[in-house]
Amino acid sequence: MGDDPELVEQNRNSLARKVGARPVYLNQMHGTDIVELQTETIDGLAADGAYTGCSGVACVVMAADCLPILLCNRAGTRVAALHAGWRGLAGREGRGILEAFHGQIMPQTTAGCAQDATEWIAWLGPCIGPQTFEVGAEVRSQFVGHQDGAVRAFVPLSNGKYLANLPLLARQRLQTLGIFAISGNDGSPLWCTATNPSHFFSHRRDRVTGRHAACIWLE
């Protein structure tokens, strides 16, 4: 909303040239649905994550304060991109988009899901940081009680609200699933989209359009 369609098209074409694969854009819903991309998959599928074992297509998620998560297996045969705002990360009753990814991908590998999960590597992209992301008690309650250690990701404020640490919440959930090779966003100020206007878009900061594209693909 508010973007110039011609500029969007130019930027997407430029991205495709640099990637060397066709980015597939999702219709993101802040949910937990994940789709498998094939070489002929079209744009616009309603989902917040994608994975593929095909070369020639790139998994893409768009974000401007939410947390993008990129994953690949150590064999280099599968990649995935997930859009993890607090809603998607929390999901329902402790089952969010990371649990959906685990449940959808791991049954396709060999027996022993916990062992298979350790064969995956995760990278956390920029998002609104724990120094800035103010949420209400209703958001905190979506995690605390369903996620071990989640209480450490919420710092109480004097106004009854909390500062939330999305990268920490994501790391905790990845580790619970058996994925321990995690790099990228550590929650430090340099990764915060809201407080680095020269580097990042931020919907919460600017209240206008603008998104980052986080991409991963097989060559």
Image (spheres, grey):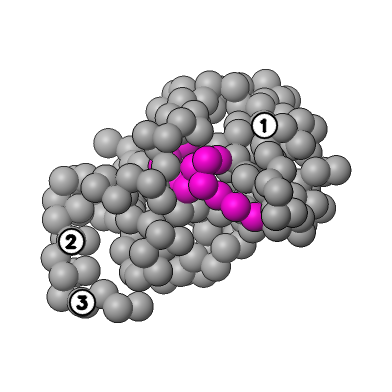
Secondary structure under badge 2? helix
Q: Residue at x 64, y 49 (%)?
A: 89
Residue under label 3, please give it.
4
Q: Residue at x 36, y 42 (%)?
A: 216
Q: Is residue 51 in view from this perspective? A: no
In the drawing, what numbered circle is on residue 11? 2
Residue 107: where, in percent of width, then height?
67, 39
Q: Is residue 131 magenta?
A: yes
Label 1 amino acid?
Gln
Residue 118 falls left or right of residue 77:
right
Residue under label 1, please give it.
172
In this rendering, is residue 42 above or below 4?
A: above
Q: Mark 1 and mark 3: span between their CA atoms?
A: 39 Å
Q: Is residue 198 magenta?
A: no
In this rendering, is residue 213 above or below 27?
A: above
Q: Label 1: few (<14), some or many (≥20) within 10 Å?
A: some
Q: Mark 2 and mark 1: span between their CA atoms?
A: 34 Å
Q: Mark 2 and mark 3: span between their CA atoms?
A: 11 Å
Q: Residue at x 55, y 68 (%)?
A: 29
Label 3 amino acid?
Asp
Dot placed on the residue nearer the N-terminal end, 2 or 3: 3
Magenta span: 124-135
Q: How many marks?
A: 3
